[in-house]
Amino acid sequence: MARQDTPTNEMSLRWTVCGDRDVTVRGAEPGDVSALRRFIDGLSRESRYFRFLSGGQVGDAVVSRVLGRHDGRDIALVVTDGEEVVANAVYVVNDADEAEFAVVVADAWQGRGLGRRLIQHLQQLARAAGLRGMRGDVLSENRRMLAIVRELGFSTRRAPGDAYVQEVSLRLAAVTREAWLAHDWFQG
Ligand SMILES: CC(C)(COP(=O)(O)OP(=O)(O)OC[C@H]1O[C@@H](n2cnc3c(N)ncnc32)[C@H](O)[C@@H]1OP(=O)(O)O)[C@@H](O)C(=O)NCCC(=O)NCCS
């Protein structure tokens, strides 16, 4: 099966958000650690809670994990506006050959299509890497995230043993062309 390494920054992309703001989407690098720390510290308590399951300070070890392990199969992306990180998307490949993913967008950038587009991009990378599927844990109260992933073809179910978490999953072979090419994919 074809595998894909963490994208090098030769593969960085430019996306236009809301038709007027250009951002860069690229693989996270060790040099991003300070910008990532600023990004995470700048998140609202709710966004930090939804992403890291803690509204408090996020530890350095977690920030390092967000940078990715760079061991070939895992993906860690940052979206930057100039020097600032405005979003981060990661997946880690588990033993079942699934991409365990998580995404977070800076509060000021939320609601502009960036989160959905990042999840679609992760889907594309996971599929290109020949992975069997994607999965993630989303808090039941995170209605926005649940709405986005359902729209992208994921199924959701209560996580076994945890009433407050929804397990979201997608078999990549089952993704339809329509889900891939959701309406905002090529638009700004
Ligand atoms: C969840 C998150 C990644 C989504 O990214 P985003 O850039 O804000 O989302 P988008 O702009 O791509 O999509 C928003 C969509 O959610 C929908 N939405 C917004 N609020 C909603 C709500 N309360 N209930 C249901 N749907 C909602 C909107 O209808 C919108 O769809 P539309 O564009 O068709 O109108 C982002 O809000 C975030 O970082 N949240 C905090 C961290 C987090 O929750 N991470 C996910 C856990 S892994």
Image (cartoon, grey):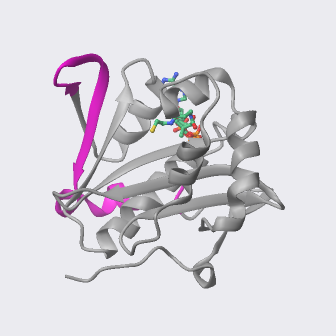
Magenta highlight on residue 180: yes
Q: Is 2 left or right of 59, judged from the image as shown? A: left
Q: Which residues are magenta?
A: 158-185
Residue at the spot x=57%, y=42% of the render? 104
Rendered image quadrant of residue 187: bottom right
Q: Residue extending furthest right?
A: 82
Residue at the spot x=20%, y=62% of the render? 97
Q: Position of residue 72 (x, y in %)?
A: 39, 75
Q: Position of residue 94 (x, y in %)?
A: 25, 56
- Image position of 117 with respect to 127: above or below: above
Magenta highlight on residue 112: no
Q: Position of residue 188 (x, y in %)?
A: 67, 58
- Image position of 100 with respect to 75: above or below: above
Rendered image quadrant of residue 165: top left
Q: Is residue 66 visible?
A: yes
Q: Is 16 left or right of 131, judged from the image as shown? A: right
Q: Quadrant of the N terminus?
A: bottom left
Q: Is residue 117 visible?
A: no
Of 38 and 139, nearer the camera is 38
Of 141 and 77, nearer the camera is 77
Of 36 and 89, nearer the camera is 36
